[in-house]
Image (cartoon, coloured by chain):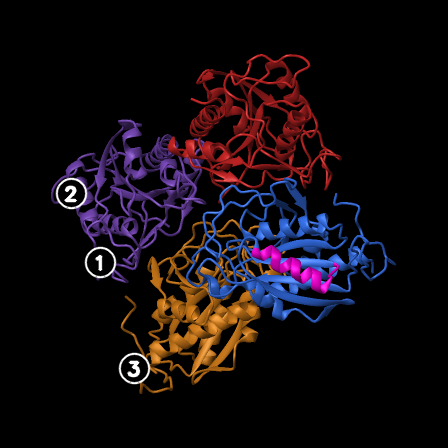
Chain colours: A purple, B orange, C blue, D red
Amino acid sequence: MAAGRRARKGDSPHFEKGDSPLFPCDVVLVTGFEPFGGEKTNPSWELCSLLPDAIGRARIETMAVPCEFRRAIETVVSAIEKHRPGVIICVGQAGGRDRLCMERIAINIDDTENADNAGVQPIDQPIAPNGPTAYFATVPVKAMAAASRIAGVPAEVSNSAGTYVCNHLLYGVLHYLAASGSTARAGFIHVPYAESQVVDKPGKPSMALPVMARGVEAAIAAALEQIDGP
Amino acid sequence: MAAGRRARKGDSPHFEKGDSPLFPCDVVLVTGFEPFGGEKTNPSWELCSLLPDAIGRARIETMAVPCEFRRAIETVVSAIEKHRPGVIICVGQAGGRDRLCMERIAINIDDTENADNAGVQPIDQPIAPNGPTAYFATVPVKAMAAASRIAGVPAEVSNSAGTYVCNHLLYGVLHYLAASGSTARAGFIHVPYAESQVVDKPGKPSMALPVMARGVEAAIAAALEQIDGP
Amino acid sequence: MAAGRRARKGDSPHFEKGDSPLFPCDVVLVTGFEPFGGEKTNPSWELCSLLPDAIGRARIETMAVPCEFRRAIETVVSAIEKHRPGVIICVGQAGGRDRLCMERIAINIDDTENADNAGVQPIDQPIAPNGPTAYFATVPVKAMAAASRIAGVPAEVSNSAGTYVCNHLLYGVLHYLAASGSTARAGFIHVPYAESQVVDKPGKPSMALPVMARGVEAAIAAALEQIDGP
Amino acid sequence: MAAGRRARKGDSPHFEKGDSPLFPCDVVLVTGFEPFGGEKTNPSWELCSLLPDAIGRARIETMAVPCEFRRAIETVVSAIEKHRPGVIICVGQAGGRDRLCMERIAINIDDTENADNAGVQPIDQPIAPNGPTAYFATVPVKAMAAASRIAGVPAEVSNSAGTYVCNHLLYGVLHYLAASGSTARAGFIHVPYAESQVVDKPGKPSMALPVMARGVEAAIAAALEQIDGP
C-alpha cells in the first residue's frame, strides 16, 4: 500500500538544493507533545528523554511540540528542515488506550470538543483545504508494532489517530513531505497514559515510561531496517 | 468538508443517460450484511425489516449484502443502478461497540485476520489501486448521530470503519459514485451486536434490534432533511 | 451452598403466627428503585411495569423503593409483611454493566462517594453492627442467569453488588428474613442503563427495557421452578 | 468495621504458647502465586523480588504459593507458623484489571470455570463448610490504596476477589487467623497483567513490575503505620 518513494540503498545521503529532497536515515526525528487537557505531563515527550542517542546507525533527535493546531506542524517542519531526518516519528498521548498504537493513516480534518493549548477549537475544518482526504503513514506500521511486541511491549496498528492535534500533525507532516517531494518517511505512535496520570482515573489503563520508550525504540529500529535494509 | 455535489431542490428526479447521474432523494437504499464470523444472524440486516416503507417522502429499499470483498460492492452497485437512490446507507455489525456509529471516512485498504464468507483474506491490499487514499462519507454524519440521540438511541461519529468488508463496501460505493459523477450520497452506520449474540460473550455490549432500527430511521430522516431541505 | 431452609413442596402455604414464617411461592415481590445520581429514570423500576401479572402460579407484586439507606430496607420489609411473598427479587441499576447480573452475595458495609437521595453518604459503616459479614443470596443465581440467557438475554452471576443502596437493600432483606426465621428466598438483579440514559455517556453500554424485563421474567420462572419444583 | 483485634502499641512482641498468638509487625509475609492459566509468569510472584528487604522496621519475607485450592492455604499457613508475621499480604494476578486492587473481603465459596494447577475445578463449593459467609480483610485497605496512589501507582479498593484461588487463599488465611485467635492482620492485593503478558491480548491493560512493586511497598508501609503506629 505505501507509496513507491522508498529510498534505495546507495542513494546519495546528501540532500542537494534543487533536487527533490532525499533524506538519508542517518537521522531520526522523534517528537513528543507538551501536556494538554489539564494534564501536568505528557508521556509522549517524557519518553523521549529515555531514548538512546542513536538507534542502529541513525542519530536520534528529539523535540517537544506545542499541542496547538498549525504551530505543531510548523514546529516539526522547521525541525525537519534543520535536521534533515530520513524518518520522522511523532509520538502523542492517547488517554484510554492500553498499548502503543502505530497509526496507519491521517485524515484531512480537524474536529474536537476540546480546545488546544492556544484555545483554538476547530470543528469539521479541513487541515489542508486542497489536500487529499488522507495520507497513509509512510513507515512500516506492522513491522513496527511487531518489533515492539517482540521487545515485550504491547503494540498494535491503529486505523484512526483521531481528529485532534495528533492526527493534525501527522497529516501536516505527510502533506509537507509530499509537497516538497521528500523521500523521508513519517509515522505516528500513540502511547497510553503514564501510570501517574491515572491514579485518579478509575478504569483508565496506563503504561510505564520506560516500557513505552523500549517499544518506541524497537519500532524505530524496525522501521530503519525495513527502509534502509539491514 | 463534504463535497459540493449537493443535489439542489428542483433538480430533475430522472436520471438521463449521458448526463451525470442525478439521483433524487425519493429513494433511500439501506443495505445490511449477511451473518459472518460464525454468527447465526447479523443485526444490520435484521433491523432492515423493522424500518418503515418510507421516511419522509422517500421510499425505503432494503437489501442483504454478502459479507465478501468485491461481491459486496458489486451487489450494492447493481442495486444503485436499479433503484437510483438519492441516498445509500449501508449498515454493518461492529461487535464490541456500544452504540450506533456513523462512519466519517472509508480508507483504501483491505486488511483482515479473518477471512470473509468466501474465504478471502486480504492483507494490506488497496481496494482500488489507483483510487484515492480515502473518501469522506457524503451524508451528514453529525446530524445523523444527533438525530439518533434525540430519538433516544445512543450514537456517535466514528473515525474508522475498520479495514474489513464494511470499510471496503463504503469505500467501493463512494468510489463508484465519484467515478460515475453521481450526486447520490452515501454513508455507513455500524451497529452493536444484538443481545442474543452476546449471551455467551461476557464483557460485550449489545443493543436491541428495535432500538437500532429507531436510531437508523432517525438518522436517515436527518440526512434527508439536510440534503433535500425540509 | 445456600442454607437448608428450602421450602419443601407440600409445605403449608399459610403462614401461621408463632411458627417460623413460611411464605409460599404464590407471591413474588419484585422491587425497583427510584431514580438516583441525577438520572431521570431508573430502569429497575420501569421494567417492573413490563412484567406479567403472574409467572407460573405465582402472582407478581411490584413496588418502587426509595434510593435511600435504611428507608429502602424498611419499605421492602413492610411490603414483605403485607404480601408474604415466597420469593423477593430486588432489581437495581448498575450503570456501566453490559448485562443482567444475578448477585451472589451481600456484604455488611455501606460505603459510597455519592450521597443517597436523602443526602446520606455513609463511609465504611456496617449495615447491621452485630450482623454477619455477609449473606449469600438464597435464590438460585446460576439457574436464573442461565434461564435469562436461554431467553436470549445476556446475564451472568456477579460476586459484588457494590457498597451502595443496592447491596444495602439485599443485605437488609436477607438479614430480616434470617432474623425472622422466614423461609422466603431473596435475591438481587442488577441491570444496565437503559439506552435513553447513555445517549450522552460515550463508552457506556445499555440494554432495552423490554429485553431486561424478558430476562428478569425468565430468571424468576427459573427460581420458582427450583424452589417450588415444577 | 474490622474487628477489635487491633494490636496495641506496647503489646509484647513475643508470642507465648497458651496465649492467643500475638504477632508483632516486625515481620511482613508477602506471598505471590506461581503462573497459572497457561501464563509463563505471574507478576504477583515476580514483583516480590523487587521488594526491599525491610519496610519501616519490619523485615519482608516473600514466598511463592502454588496456584492450587487447599495447597495454597496450607503453604501460607506453614509460612505463618514459621515466620510469625504481624501482617500477611497475599498478592495475585487479576488479568484484565488496570490497577492495583486492595481486596476488601473474601467469601466462602470456590467456583471456577478454570481448573487450578492441580486440575481441580470446584463449582459452588464452600471453602470452610462451617465457616462464616465472608471475612473482611483486616488490613486498612483504603489507607493502602491511598498510599499507593500517593506513590504514583494506580490503586483502588475492590469488593470482590473473585471465586478462584485468590479469594480462596485470602479466606483461608483469615479463617486460620480467626480460628487460632491470632492478632496478625491479613489482606490481598490483586495486580494487573505485566506488559509482557498482554502483547497478544488486545484490549487488556497491563502494569510494569517495578510500578507494581512500588505500589505494594507503599501499601505495606501504610498498613504498618496504621497498625503499629508511626
Residue C230 relative to residue D121: left or right: right
Above/below status of B92 relative to D39: below
Above/below status of C65 relative to D203: below
- Circles 3 and 2 on the same subunit: no
Label 1: which secondary element: loop
Q: Give the magenta range.
A: C71-86
Name the quadrant of the C terminus of chain A: top left
Are dots 2 and 1 in contact, CB under 8 Å?
no
Q: Residue furthest front?
A: C18
Picture quarter containing residue B189? bottom left
The one of B172 and D9 positioned closer to us in this rendering: D9
Above/below status of D68 relative to D104: above
Q: Is residue C152 visible?
A: no
Q: CA distance from mark 1 to mark 3?
A: 27 Å
Residue B131 relative to residue B161: left or right: left
Q: Earlier in the sequence, mark 2 or mark 1?
A: 2
